[in-house]
Amino acid sequence: MLIRGSLSMEHASFVGLYALYEDDACLCILDSNPLSRGHSLIIPKSHFSSLDATPPSVIAAMCSKVPLISSAIVKATGSDSFNLLVNNGAAAGQVIFHTHIHIIPRKEQDCLWASESLRRQSLKLDQEASRLADLVREQLSSVSPSSSSSGNSEVSEGEGSSLSRS
């Protein structure tokens, strides 16, 4: 759909016809291959290939629209609720390499995801879980306030985690 920051001519009419919301930072359109009626995408107007390449200010702008847009979609589709989803990277199912957030309307017992029929297991509170938590906290504490692995992280005053293992 989005090619190097602009719409292809083929998809421009689709976006125009099926645009739900637009502001200076982002737009929301119906997904062209929906998982459910009303499945929509919130897309930044600037091009970023993945969520981790997207500046926090752009993510914040996109996420700030979720309550407004999802409420309208849930009401319009008669849904009970919705999933908010980001496929970040090929292994996670990302096929359009332009950051976007899915809003997927849901109805009770629609069994949209095969995993919903699987029983979840309780986290084993053992050494492995403790080691994993320590490793994640270590990674979080090693991120400097002015940069991250993608070079786009901006930590504002008061942000960040103060958790540490006692």
Image (spheres, helix red, strand yellow):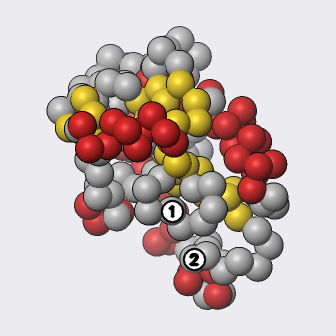
**Residue at x 51%, y 42% (from the top left corner):** 18
**Residue at x 58%, y 36% (from the top left corner):** 20
| Side (left or right) of 137 relative to 97 | right
Q: Which residue is mark 1?
A: 34
Q: Give whichever of 103, 73 is nearer the camera.
A: 73
Please state the horizontal and vertical placement of residue 16, each as a whole percent of the image: 45, 34
Instruction: Identify the secondary structure beneath mark 1.
Output: loop
Q: Give whichever of 145, 62 is nearer the camera.
A: 62
| Side (left or right) of 48 relative to 166 | left
Q: Crowdedness of circle 1 by 10 Å Cα count: few (<14), some, many (20+)?
A: some
Is residue 77 placed above or below 58 in the rendered structure? below
Can you tell which mark lies on residue 113?
Answer: 2
The amino acid on which the numbered mark 1 sits, given as a three-letter code, is Pro
Q: Residue furthest bottom?
A: 118
Q: Crowdedness of circle 2 by 10 Å Cα count: few (<14), some, many (20+)?
A: few
Can residue 105 be seen at all in this image of the molecule? yes
Report which quarter residue 149 is drawn in.
top left
Q: Marks 2/1: CA distance?
A: 13 Å
Is residue 143 placed above or below 124 in the rendered structure? above
Please state the horizontal and vertical placement of residue 8, each as a whole percent of the image: 23, 38
Instruction: Identify the secondary structure beneath mark 2.
Output: loop
The amino acid on which the numbered mark 2 sits, given as a three-letter code, is Trp
